[in-house]
Structures are given as C-alpha cells and as structure tokens.
Image (cartoon, rainbow, N blue to C red):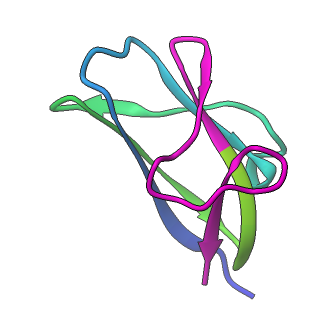
Amino acid sequence: MKAVKTAFVYKDAKAKSVKIAGSFTSWKDVKLTKKNGVWATDIYILPGTYPYHFTVDGKKKLDPGKPKAPTGDSLVDVN
C-alpha cells in the first residue's frame, strides 16, 4: 500500500497558529502554513479512516466539513 498525499485546510484569517494532530501523526502536532488567510499542509497517509483535530491558537477545533468520530474528533477517509 502506498501513502496518499492528503491536503488539510483550515480557514481562519485571524488565527496566529494552526496545528493538526491525528492518529496518522501519532497525535503529534504538525504546523500548518498560512497563505492568504488560509492555513494548509499536505501529509502523506496510508489509505484508511483516521481521527484528527486542529489546534487553533491553543484550542481544539474540529474540521467543519468532515464527519465526527465517537472520540469527538473529525474523521478523514484516505483512499
């Protein structure tokens, strides 16, 4: 199985810091880069379904466009 380049985007022009953490990062924070008010990063992930969340200025935030996991995190489906 090959890892798939997966884009994560968070829109908040006023945020000073946005990070993502999920089971695909072993719950370690990965910083997103801000460009034109949009925060983004690409992460290579093996196919599957994974829980994750954003940390925006120190506060946990869900991805509004994704389904919610029983754990209270967002879910991403990579295929």
Determine the residue positioned at 51% across, 68% down. Answer: 5
Residue 70 coordinates in the image, percent (x, y): 82, 54
Residue sitting farthest toward the left? 36
Residue 53 coordinates in the image, percent (x, y): 64, 40
Task: Name the quadrant containing residue 62.
Answer: top right
5 versus 62 height, above or below: below
Query: Is 63 on the left-hand or right-hand side of 23?
Result: left
Task: Name the quadrant containing residue 49.
Answer: bottom right
18 versus 11 height, above or below: above
Quadrant of the frame with the C terminus:
bottom right
Q: Magenta stretch: give its range.
A: 53-79
Please tell me whether residue 14 belongs to the stretch shown in magenta: no
Residue 25 coordinates in the image, percent (x, y): 75, 47
Determine the residue positioned at 51% across, 46% down. Answer: 63
**Numbered label tally:** 0
Query: Is 10 on the left-hand or right-hand side of 44?
Result: left
Please tell me whether residue 73 belongs to the stretch shown in magenta: yes
17 versus 7 height, above or below: above
Residue 75 coordinates in the image, percent (x, y): 66, 60
Quadrant of the frame with the N terminus:
bottom right
29 or 58: nearer the eye?
58
Residue sitting farthest toward the bottom? 1
2 or 11: nearer the eye?
11
Determine the residue positioned at 75% across, 56% down. Answer: 69
Determine the residue positioned at 45% across, 34% down. Answer: 32
Task: Name the quadrant containing residue 67.
Answer: bottom right
